[in-house]
């Protein structure tokens, strides 16, 4: 079985448009949450959101390439460019090797709605344009990036709601570990626009603390009132140890565990057992004890029930081991389909730079979060191993463990 | 619509939307090869023609369109 290492990372998020900017924001505890005035007018209960600029790609890609890309794919392209550069992988390597792509994505709402609006207006599908179908399929990110980067390996989108990005890394880990692939671009992408999040807002699960946008996302805080949607893209280069050594790549970390589970219960309300099982499976696979994990990057989105049940699950697994815990969603908001991949990158940046990013806005714990060793302010500390949780609607759970490479 | 205006509007969207180099726009230029338009670009040509001239083209309309001159003539015949 191959060892699986991380040799490249790229990020495009509301707390920074590249690795350096994001590292600084994480260290400073900087929030990326703003008000999108269009949302209230459109009918949203909450106008809070993370926001990123839509990348301008005219100088980088041809019209034919750009016309098939929706918003989430543009984010993913920019993040993947950085990841490939970070990994020192060039066109020649992509041409000479069977490199794959596995991205988490679970919507292309803006593209689908815009194209159908056009058809409804014109009453003629011929007038929707050639890019609509490639923007609208759920696998839009992987189909576009596989074409642009001329990839020859696995080419697949992973849809698992807010655990999509994490499962993409877990599945990539298994494909490389088993020897089926040597190098896979894994990641997650999430569109940010008013057409994408209306039905989510309709559930009443978004924070309405609109007077103080940067204080709205407050995972584990007693006065949390809901999540704040966000997005962008995160991209990681997963590679077999042999492949990394062969091309002299810098190794940033080693993926050692992927635990997954399904709650088998309610479609939206998370439970305690499913996440607990995912974390235990990841630890078993990594052959690590809970006390050997230095940091848990929690899924915690700032919803009352979700955070409560995750706090119970983390306490179930980690007990009194005093493991540091924080939710970077306090700064980024909930990056949904992207979150599982981006939060591995956030944790990798902490591991690489020896600090633990704070769970900002945590002023008062509740009965369950009080049992965790939550990080309120940035801690300068060496991290050797971390675990990153991601959970999604339908009760899908994923926990990934990454170690510093030795 | 005057044919000069038709030609000017077509050239504008070929340059702006299809990113065709202005110097490649010649009457005898082969639409498919010289202008590097593939089968998907023809779908977008239909959209551009509709939005610029309010004329709907079908696939059959392109059967005899080889050069840019043919394309100008096609739109002119539809408009006038």
Image (cartoon, coloured by chain):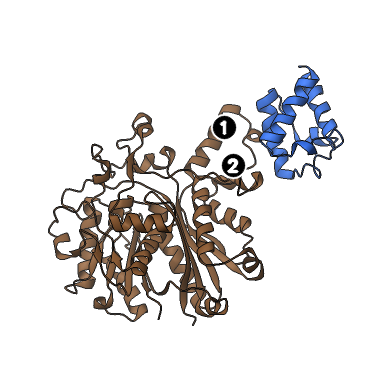
Chain colours: A brown, B blue
Question: Which corner quadrant of the image does residue A265 belong to?
Answer: bottom left
Q: Is residue A387 visible?
A: yes
Mark 1 — residue? A118
Residue drawn at x 67%, y 32% as measured from the top left: B47
Which one is nearer the viewer's eye here, A57 or A44? A57
Picture coordinates of residue A203, whole percent (x, y): 31, 42
Could you say which disc has been placed on residue A132 in the image?
2
Where, quadrant-wise, is the C terminus of chain A in this rendering? Answer: bottom left
Percent position of residue A157, x then y: 51, 58
Position of residue A22 in the picture relative to residue A147 (left or right)? left
Give whichever of A396, A373 is nearer the camera.
Answer: A373
Q: Which residue is pictured at 23% across the width and 36% down the height?
A: A211
Is residue A272 visible in the rendered image? The answer is: no
Mark 1 or mark 2: whose residue is earlier in sequence: 1
- Work out whether B63 lies above or below A16: above
What is the x, y in percent for residue A206? 29, 43
Residue at 38%, 48% in the rendered image: A14
Chain for numbered disc 2? A
Relative to A378, say whether A34 is above or below: above
A225 on left or right of B6? left
Q: Contact, CB < 8 Å: mark 1 with mark 2?
A: yes
Residue count near mark 2 (Cα–Cα under 10 Å), binned few <14, some 14–19, many ≥20: some
């Amino acid at each position: 079985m191959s060892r699986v290492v991380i040799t490249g990372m790229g990020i495009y998020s509301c707390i920074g448009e590249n690795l350096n900017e994001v590292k600084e924001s994480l260290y400073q505890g900087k929030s990326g949450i703003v008000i999108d005035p269009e949302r209230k007018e459109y009918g949203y209960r909450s106008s809070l959101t993370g926001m990123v600029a839509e990348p301008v790609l005219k100088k980088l890609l041809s019209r034919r390439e750009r016309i098939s890309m929706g918003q989430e794919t543009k984010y993913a392209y920019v993040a993947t460019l950085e990841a490939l550069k970070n990994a020192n992988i060039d066109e020649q390597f992509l041409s000479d090797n069977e490199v794959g792509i596995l991205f988490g994505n679970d919507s292309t709402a803006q593209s689908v709605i815009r194209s159908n609006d056009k058809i409804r207006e014109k009453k003629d599908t011929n007038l929707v344009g050639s890019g609509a179908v490639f923007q609208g399929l759920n696998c839009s990110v992987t189909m576009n990036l596989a074409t642009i980067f001329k990839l020859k390996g696995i080419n697949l989108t992973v849809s698992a709601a807010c655990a999509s990005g994490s499962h993409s890394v877990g599945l990539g880990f298994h494909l490389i570990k088993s020897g089926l692939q040597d190098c896979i671009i894994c990641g997650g992408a999430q569109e940010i626009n008013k057409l994408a999040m209306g039905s989510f807002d309709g559930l009443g699960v978004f924070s309405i603390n609109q007077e103080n946008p940067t204080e709205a996302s407050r995972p584990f805080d007693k006065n949390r009132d809901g999540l704040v949607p966000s997005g962008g893209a995160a991209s990681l280069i997963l590679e077999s140890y042999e492949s990394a050594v062969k091309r002299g790549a810098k190794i940033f970390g080693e993926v050692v565990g992927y635990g997954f589970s399904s709650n088998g219960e309610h479609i939206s309300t998370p439970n305690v057992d499913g996440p607990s099982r995912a974390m235990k499976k990841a630890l078993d696979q990594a052959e690590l004890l809970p006390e050997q994990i230095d940091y848990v990057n929690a899924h915690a989105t700032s919803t009352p029930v979700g955070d409560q049940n995750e706090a119970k699950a983390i306490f179930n697994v980690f007990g009194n081991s005093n493991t540091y815990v924080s939710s970077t969603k306090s700064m980024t908001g909930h990056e949904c389909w992207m979150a599982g991949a981006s939060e591995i990158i956030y944790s990798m940046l902490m591991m690489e730079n020896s600090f633990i990013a704070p769970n900002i806005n945590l002023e008062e714990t509740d009965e369950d979060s009080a049992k965790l060793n939550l990080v309120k302010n940035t801690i300068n500390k060496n991290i050797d191993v971390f675990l990153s949780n991601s959970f999604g609607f339908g009760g899908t759970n994923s926990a990934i463990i990454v170690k510093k490479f030795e | 619509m005057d044919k000069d205006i038709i030609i000017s509007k077509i050239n504008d969207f070929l340059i702006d939307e299809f990113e065709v180099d202005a110097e490649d726009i010649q009457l005898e230029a082969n639409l498919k090869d010289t202008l590097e338009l593939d089968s998907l670009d023809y779908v977008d040509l239909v959209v551009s023609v509709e939005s610029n001239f309010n004329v709907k083209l079908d696939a059959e309309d392109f059967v005899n369109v080889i050069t840019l001159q043919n394309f100008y003539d096609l739109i002119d015949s539809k408009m006038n």
